[in-house]
């Protein structure tokens, strides 16, 4: 992958061989973000898990104390009183079966998170092929399959993020924007690391977090000392 001049210049400020403390890494990520827009700060954790084994899956959610800096659009699958509750709680879209063709046939995906009441999962399951690959399928572990739609919506709007292993057993999570203060990013990073540490599979032998890297959307990665991050 070819990088531009700005990226290469920014990368010079980072010692690739060094494992930084979180505070120092966050400072560097902010300093080396050179794009003209407010970049997202992301955490990439390479794990020692093998996601092919069900008992080594890492999946869950955490509410970041300072949010993500992003406006999140929530779609809720619910009926009757629960649909009314979702609308009152501030869901951006609420519906049931009538949304299936819109998503399946028209490719409508103007939402970031999907919440469903348990009784609607039979309907939502028909959208597995569309929502699954995009990481949008509601999941009880992430708190997005629930009867308490008010709490689910409030948490998501407040900065709840999901984490899960990708095919390479890496977790990629946004923890805020470059415009956030170092303190706010630090608090979000700490909350994420505490959640991931608790989510360590009990069956895992050996190292859990092999590497932790912080980076802005367009900036170079800064490696964080995994032992100090946990």
Image: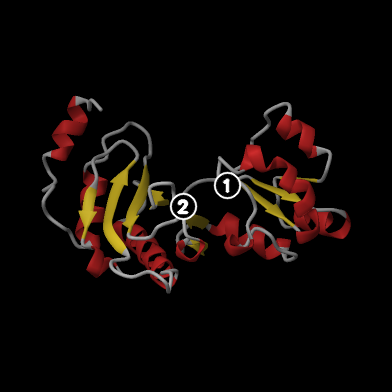
The picture places residue 72, in percent across and down from the top left corner, at 58, 47
The picture places residue 91, in percent across and down from the top left corner, at 70, 50
Circle 2/circle 1 CB separation < 8 Å: yes
For image coordinates 71% across by 34% down, the residue present is 103
Question: Where is residue 193, by image quadrant?
Answer: bottom left
Q: Is residue 194 left or right of residue 25?
A: right
Quadrant occupied by the N terminus: top left
Q: Is residue 97 left or right of residue 218?
A: right
Q: Name the secondary structure under disc 2.
A: loop
**Marker disc for residue 68:** 2
Q: Is residue 110 left or right of residue 93?
A: left
Question: Where is residue 4, by image quadrant?
Answer: top left
For image coordinates 21% across by 32% down, the residue present is 7
The picture places residue 67, in percent across and down from the top left corner, at 48, 56
Q: Is residue 218 above or below residue 141?
A: above
Between 51 and 131, which is closer to the camera in this rendering?
51
The residue beneath circle 1 is 72
The picture places residue 156, in percent across and down from the top left corner, at 59, 56
Q: Is residue 65 left or right of residue 18?
A: right
Q: Name the secondary structure under disc 1.
A: loop
Quadrant occupied by the C terminus: bottom left
């Amino acid at each position: 992958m070819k990088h531009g001049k700005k990226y290469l210049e920014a990368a010079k400020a980072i010692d690739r061989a060094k494992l930084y403390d979180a505070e120092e890494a966050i400072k560097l990520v902010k300093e080396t973000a050179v794009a003209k827009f407010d970049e997202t700060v992301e955490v990439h954790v390479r794990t020692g898990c093998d996601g092919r084994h069900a008992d080594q899956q890492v999946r869950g959610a955490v509410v970041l104390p300072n949010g993500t800096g992003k406006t999140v659009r929530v779609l809720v699958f619910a009926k009757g009183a629960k649909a009314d509750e979702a609308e009152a709680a501030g869901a951006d879209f609420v519906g049931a079966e009538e949304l299936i063709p819109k998503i399946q046939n028209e490719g409508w995906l103007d939402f970031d998170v999907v919440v469903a009441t348990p009784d609607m999962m039979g309907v939502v399951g028909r959208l597995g092929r569309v929502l699954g690959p995009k990481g949008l399928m509601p999941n009880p572990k992430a708190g997005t399959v629930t009867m308490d739609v008010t709490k689910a919506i409030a948490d998501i709007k407040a900065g709840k993020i999901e984490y899960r292993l990708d095919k390479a057993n890496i977790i990629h999570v946004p923890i805020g924007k470059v415009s956030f203060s170092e303190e706010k990013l630090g608090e979000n990073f700490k909350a994420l690391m505490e959640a991931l540490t608790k989510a360590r599979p009990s069956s895992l032998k050996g190292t859990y977090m092999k590497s932790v890297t912080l980076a802005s959307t367009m900036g170079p990665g800064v490696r964080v000392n995994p032992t100090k991050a946990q």
